[in-house]
Amino acid sequence: MSVQTTLDVNAIREQFPLLDQSINGHRLAYLDSTATAQKPLAVLDAMDRYYRTINANVHRGVYQISEAATEAYEGTRRTIGRFIGAKSTKEIIFTRNATEAINLVAQSWGRANLQAGDRILLTVSEHHSNLVPWQLLAAQIGVELDFIELDDQGRLDLSKLDQLLTKRTKLVALTHMSNVLGTINPVETVIAAAKQVGALVLLDGAQSVPHIPVNVQALGCDFLAFSGHKMCGPTGIGVLWARRELLEAMPPFMGGGDMIKRVGLRESSWNDLPWKFEAGTPAIAEAIGLGAAIDFLNGLGMEAIHERERQLTHYAWDKLSTIDGLTIFGPPAAERGGLLSFTLAGVHAHDVAAILDTQGIAVRAGHHCTHPLHDIFGVPATVRASFYLYTLEEEIDRLAEALVLARDTFQL
């Protein structure tokens, strides 16, 4: 099957009802997809259909609608497995989001396999979700944290990677794509180096999986975490993928129903994979919605989506880099995903976002859950405009015009 190389963006936008509205008298320009993506009709309809026709618990009923719900829920697991190149659906664990997936690894694999003096290598650009769980683990058992620094353009500085990776390094955990800089990190290089010292690798794929083709077998990582709501799916559903042999050896993360085989008063035995890590009634409608979202993305083609975002990023870079007083953080457009984070001289990021909202433009302003990275920049906050498969060039034009308005308003 040939890969689609162009997208009919206007036709795509017709599938996203939220985009068809006005804010403050202007057509909504939604430029915050890095925070959460909008949902197409296919996702909304799939979740509505579940609640209207087969709303029942999964894995427990022998009646028809329960079996139908179970098949739809487990069908998404198969869809995800194909989407990321997993060897088995038993390697696909449903979580609430990427944050929970990373915490699961820290508290299950980490506490079972690490000890005081072991080292975990991170980067200084990590989202708090891939930093705080390891800080908690360090406080709990005494592991030590090391960090890969950045060069002056926001790329990982790998010049000292050999010194950072030692026999004491047991895990490398890093983002595949930065949620602030947009940098697509050279994870293949890091993974290969980590394997040389016997370290495992966890990838935070929250920003990469929705936007670029990701295949865990090709990458060679050991864990991958991502969230449904950033890839046109609903909130409240995420995924942990891990190599089966790792999951088999890991203790459960939470206890309760569905993750057990048998329960006695003083001891229990655990269910098979993947259900060992899925305690309690799961997010059934959300999982079904995520499956519909992946089908939607597959129908467009991940290569085509990535190429469209490259075009938008170059277009936005050219537009915004000409604005006096505006500073873009991170590498050139050719080396990043579909987002730009920037400051506007003399104007706080929150004030910039407020002015943009008066023009119907939705962007994110703040530290974007990356306090340490903003400390390195020496700024309290940045404005972030992010793009996805439904973004139009004319929305970027409006963004540039509104930024000039914001600058001029606060320089009066």
Image (tube, rainbow, N blue to C red):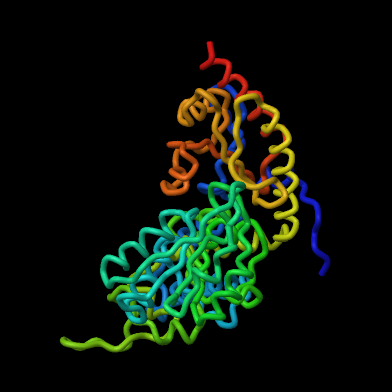
Image-quadrant location for residue 363: top right
Q: Is residue 145 left or right of residue 222?
A: left
Residue in front for this viewpoint, 199 or 162 = 162
Q: State the residue lying farthest toward the right.
A: 2
Task: Left or right? Give the position of 206 relative to 306.
Answer: left
Q: Nearer the viewer, residue 50 or 353?
A: 353
In what quadrant of the picture does the N terminus appear?
A: bottom right
Count of numbered circles in the view: 0
Residue at (50% x, 84% y) in the render: 244
Q: Name above or below for residue 382 compared with residue 231.
A: above
- Residue 232 x/y as whole percent: 57, 53
Residue 328 visible, this angle: yes
| Residue at 65%, 51% in the rendered image | 337
Q: Is residue 41 visible in the rendered structure shown here?
A: no
Q: Nearer the viewer, residue 247 or 110?
A: 110
Vertical placement of 60 versus 268: above or below? above
Residue 278 in the image: above or below residue 249: above
Q: Residue at x 83, y 66 (%)?
A: 2
Q: Position of residue 228 (x, y in %)?
A: 51, 59
Q: Is residue 241 above or below residue 157?
A: below
Q: Position of residue 372 (x, y in %)?
A: 42, 49
| Residue at 60%, 43% in the rendered image | 386
Which residue in the rendered view is the most extreme toward the left? 265
* Left or right, 270 with reference to 412: left
Q: Is residue 388 left or right of residue 72?
A: right
